[in-house]
Image: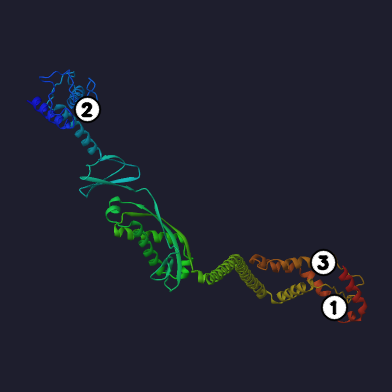
Amino acid sequence: MNEYNERSTWRRMRALLSINDPRWGRDDGKGNDGSRPRANESKRPPGGDGDGPPDLDEMWRNFNRRLSGLFGGKGGNGFRPDNGRAARVGVGIVIGVLVAVYAGSGLFVVQDGQTGVVLQFGKLSGTVGQGVHWRAPYPFASHEIVDTSQVRSIEIGRNNVVRLANVKEAAMLTRDADIVDVRFIVQYRIRSATDYLFRSVDPERSVSQAAQAAVRAIVGTRSAADMLNQDRDALRAQLSAAIQRDLDRYQSGLEITAVTMQSVAAPEQTQAAYAEVAKAREDREAAKRAAQAYANDLLPKAQGDAAKLADEAKAYADRVVMEAEGDADRFKQVYAQYSKAPAVIRERMYLETMQEIYSNATKVFVGNKGGNSVVYLPLDKLVEQGRQNAANAATPAGASAPDAASAPAAATSSAPASAASAAAAPAPGSDVLRSREAFRSRSREDDTK
């Protein structure tokens, strides 16, 4: 039945294609001799491959044979119907390939330093990290790749003029109503891919506005002098913290990595005056440093001198006290002896006093009241005794009590010498008769010796 339908169909098609054929409507050879050409019949080669229309039946049979051989059917010159099985298999293969390609469109690769955000029916489904991932094909799902390792930067304080205020973008108003130009660079990166995609409309503008708000808030609480002289590291840390706080409050998904200060200067119109102020400030600091260095050099010396004077004063006080105590002990001892024999003690004290007086004299007076023509003067001993007395006077006066107690004994032993010296003192009488020239000559000799 199928074969009959196919044959009838191709016959109709051949009839349509043979309308322009001059033999249309004539018998093909039934009841006529096919070897005799007719008068009005065009002469064509016997092979049938002339200029006429192609044989569609033959073409269809060839196509079916090749398709059957391709899918395991039996070939041959005879036509063998396959009931459309080959066509169905081919269509299935094509559909399978299309389905595989469609399903494979859901594969995507996330590189290192990137984050993949998967959306399902436009709603956030999740995030994925580095590697190969699959999601449902479009339009059921989609994905976005966000580079979270790239560091972006934006400059704040450019020479752009703000139209509303007609001032430069870098101009900042200080607490004392001065203007300071502040320029810095903000570096940031994406910290949260979901916040960056769904909560931030213009990330660069968000960072710029947050940075400008932060720097104006900081500059507005300080004077111009504080801003020009403030430590740049401290200002950078304050700016970074303030900008990050604003970005976190807006949930922008951005993170500030660094803030680089470029310049903090006065406006161009006032830079000369600020330069003079800065120079005066530097001179003041230099003078302070010089004064501090001088003080550091002078104070130790003064402290050392003060300590030395204090030690000397203490030593002098101790020496005076010891001398006074020694004199008091000596006076007590002398008084004890004096109470026993007042006349002897008075004579002894007189002799000691005269000995002390004459021991420091540089002249020797000799009288001949006794009539002696030869007087023995031990000049070497007298000179030696004078030196010894001078050395004793140079020694510390803080003598101990035993030394003071032994003083009477020494005075007693030297009493004869003192008496001799006292006897050698000039007496009135015949000594006055000596000529002045003799005294002068002897005085010169004594001075020479």
Q: Secondary structure at mark 1?
A: loop
Q: Which kind of residue does numbered mark 2 sit on?
A: Gly
- What residue did someone put label 3 on? 383
Q: Residues within 10 Å of mark 2 (few under 14, many from 20)?
A: few
**Element type where label 3 sits in the image:** helix
Q: CA distance from mark 1 to mark 2?
A: 191 Å
Residue for point 91% across, 74% down? 441
Residue beneath disc 1? 426
Quarter of the image for residue 16 reads: top left
Q: Residue at x 79, y 69 (%)?
A: 417
Please tell me which residue lies in front, 189 or 37.
37
208 relative to 301 in the view: left or right:
left
Q: Foreground residue, 288 or 64?
A: 64
Q: Label for residue 52? A: 2
User: Splitting the image into 4 quarters, where does residue 18 fall?
Assistant: top left
Is the N terminus in the top left, top right, bottom left or bottom right quadrant? top left
Q: What numbered label is drawn on residue 116?
A: none
Give how far across and how far down residue 375 sits, in percent: 89, 70
Image x and y of residue 331, in percent: 65, 73
Is residue 319 something that shows in the picture? yes
- Camera-side mark, 1 or 2: 2
What is the spatial separation of the Cα atoms under label 2 and label 3, in whole angstroms? 175 Å
Residue 234 visible in the snapshot: no
Horizontal arrangement in the rendering, residue 370 relative to residue 400 (left or right): right
Q: Residues within 10 Å of mark 1 (few under 14, many from 20)?
A: some
Q: Position of residue 209 (x, y in %)?
A: 36, 62
